[in-house]
Image: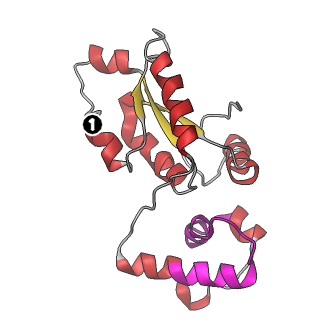
């Protein structure tokens, strides 16, 4: 188990984000336990989608459920996993130490199922560009894994990925 710094994206801007992303990309963990603040899902789900695109088992721990309940908020715990490609979404409260047994069970079970990952589908124009960058990467770096993730990062002008795998995007972007 490796505890990484809390981040909101795999596009690094801070040292913590660089450390976390490098570990996730280079060390290739067997599974990823993504602990998110349930009171601020919008901010956290972008990272969740990026993690799913890494094609590793992802388990979403929806933390701070005690506060969500205190505020009278609700999260559809059936619909959210469906929207995320049927990954386990486990409500927990680290403060009150509730849901942790269920979470550990989900981690073990989901890890044993092996890599799933979810491909986020963008509109046709973006998908075409992703495919063209994947083709360039495949040609220049035949041993590169997870071409789609790298292609998306290149289209985002991610400095680290572009530095590590320089290609001419030319008329793609």
Quadrant occupied by the N terminus: top right
Residue 39 vertical placement versus 57 (above, below): above
Q: Nearer the viewer, residue 54 or 95?
A: 54
Residue 115 vertical placement versus 151 (above, below): above
Q: Position of residue 9 (x, y in %)?
A: 55, 48
SS type, badge 1:
loop
Q: Nearer the viewer, residue 98 or 94?
A: 98
Q: Residue at x 41, y 28 (%)?
A: 90
Q: Looking at the rendering, which quadrant does residue 168 occupy?
A: bottom right
* Range of magenta residues: 131-159
| Residue furthest to the bottom | 171
Q: Position of residue 138 (x, y in %)?
A: 67, 80
Q: Residue at x 45, y 62 (%)?
A: 119
Q: Is residue 161 magenta?
A: no
Q: Position of residue 53 (x, y in %)?
A: 52, 57
Q: Is residue 150 magenta?
A: yes
Q: Residue at x 44, y 12 (%)?
A: 98
Residue 99 shown left or right of residue 11 in the figure = left
Residue 77 shown left or right of residue 136 in the figure = left
The 10 Å Cα crowd at callout 1, few under 14, some 14 to 19, many 20 or more, is few
> Most prominent secondary structure in the magenta stretch?
helix
Residue 86 vertical placement versus 132 (above, below): above
Label 1: which residue? 78
Q: Position of residue 105 (x, y in %)?
A: 50, 25
**Number of marks in picture:** 1
Q: How is the image coloured?
A: secondary structure
Q: Looking at the rendering, which quadrant does residue 145 occupy?
A: bottom right
| Residue furthest to the top | 96
Q: Residue at x 54, y 49 (%)?
A: 51
């Amino acid at each position: 188990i490796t505890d990484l710094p809390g981040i909101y994206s795999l596009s690094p801007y801070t040292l913590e984000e660089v450390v976390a992303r490098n570990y996730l990309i280079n060390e290739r963990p067997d599974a990823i336990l993504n602990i998110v603040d349930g009171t601020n899902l919008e901010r956290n789900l972008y990272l969740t989608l990026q993690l799913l695109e890494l094609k590793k088992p992802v388990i979403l721990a929806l933390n701070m459920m005690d506060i969500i309940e205190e505020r009278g908020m609700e999260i559809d715990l059936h619909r959210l996993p469906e929207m995320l490609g049927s990954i386990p979404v486990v409500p927990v409260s680290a403060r009150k130490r509730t849901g942790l047994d269920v979470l550990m069970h989900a981690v073990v079970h989901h890890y044993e199922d092996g890599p799933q990952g979810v491909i986020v589908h963008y509109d046709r124009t973006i998908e075409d560009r992703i495919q063209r960058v994947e083709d360039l990467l495949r040609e220049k770096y035949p041993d590169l894994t997870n071409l789609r993730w790298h292609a998306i990062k290149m289209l985002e002008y991610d400095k680290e990925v572009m530095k590590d795998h320089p290609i001419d995007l030319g008329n793609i972007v």
